[in-house]
Amino acid sequence: MNDMPEARVSDSASWFLSTARERIAGLLDHGSFMEFLPPTERVQSPHLALFDLPVAFDDGVIVGRGRLAGRDVLIAAQEGQFMGGTFAEVSGAKLLGLIRAARDNDKLPRAILLLLDSGGVRLQEANAGELAVAEVMRAIMEARMAGVAVIALVGGRAGAFGGAGLTAATCSRIAISEQGRTGVSGPEVIETNKGVEEFDSKDKALVWSVTGGRNRRLIGGADAYAEDTVSGFREAASSLIDRAPTFDLATLQAEQQRLSARVERFANCSTAAEMWRVLGITAPQSIRDMNDAAFVKIVADVKEASHDGR
């Protein structure tokens, strides 16, 4: 373990531009973070050298515990600037170990914050990465059944795609910023497999309108919208921990009904703007240009009209 002093991070620092360690330092109460398997332990990928690729002494994932507004929490943060924050043998094992520990040890905090910033599975360790994603998803479900709240925070450069997108969907709640993006297949993957006519990954307006945080929040793919600041995500995380639903059959049935209704509601829509119009937003094209405060009010109005508690 490591409890070295943390550098202070400004509340107004951009979550999108910050590193994983900066996000942890800013999110948690100052001086409360204690890292498990820190870089000094040199727990790194044994495979990257075979491809003549650089390694990271934490393999791009930081795990530990700390306090959020006085509440004890476990925390894991992916570093999107190292290999795209990808799931692999070591990084996946660190995530899995943290979640299983929360599941099995009732003396540990009953809340986990997952700071997701990942394009999915590391191609150089594909089999290990795919296995890690499956095991992490199962562990999250089991932890939730044991009463642990698992909160996903999405707002980094890599977004949360592939295995990270699936992982986010298994969490108790999701907070996302405008800059955050989430989905199963990333824009480049869709373009590669279906062609640029299907999805142009260079069309940033298209990418953000489909996978971006504002669309995800409006259509119910995220439970809270955070300003792109450290303080914004701290407020969102704090609010969601106490709103984490129990995980049982009734929860699954309610979620299935919600998703089925969403599919039916948007069945004839081919763009995000069309979905927003269905939600009753009279000027959907204005969504991308409005400030955060105005967008939060739009979300509140939409949720009130639809009676959707998410």
Image (spheres, grey):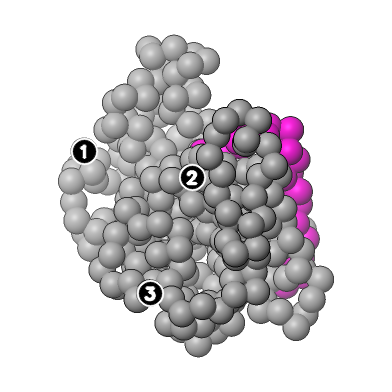
Q: Are marks 3 and 2 in contact (CB under 8 Å)?
A: no
Local SS, label 3 = loop
| Distance CA(mark 3)–CA(mark 2) | 21 Å
- Look at 57% across and 38% down and name the residue there: 120
Q: Is residue 297 visible?
A: no
Frontmost of labels 2 and 1 is 2
Q: Is residue 101 above or below residue 174?
A: below
Where residue 211 sits in the image (x, y, percent)? 41, 38
Q: Where is residue 270, by image quadrant?
A: top left
For the N terminus, the quadrant is: bottom right
Q: Which residue is mark 1?
A: 285
Q: Is residue 37 left or right of residue 218?
A: right
Dot 1 alpha-carbon crowd within 10 angstroms: few under 14, some 14 to 19, many 20 or more: some
Q: Is residue 176 left or right of residue 169?
A: left
| Distance CA(mark 3)–CA(mark 1) | 41 Å
Q: Which residue is mark 3?
A: 7
Q: Is residue 107 visible?
A: yes
Q: Which residue is mark 2?
A: 82
Magenta segment boundaries in residue numbering: 118-147
- Look at 56% across and 44% down and name the residue there: 55
| Distance CA(mark 2)–CA(mark 1) | 35 Å
Disc 3 residue type (three-letter): Ala
Q: Is residue 195 above or below residue 173?
A: above
Where residue 251 sits in the image (x, y, percent)? 69, 60
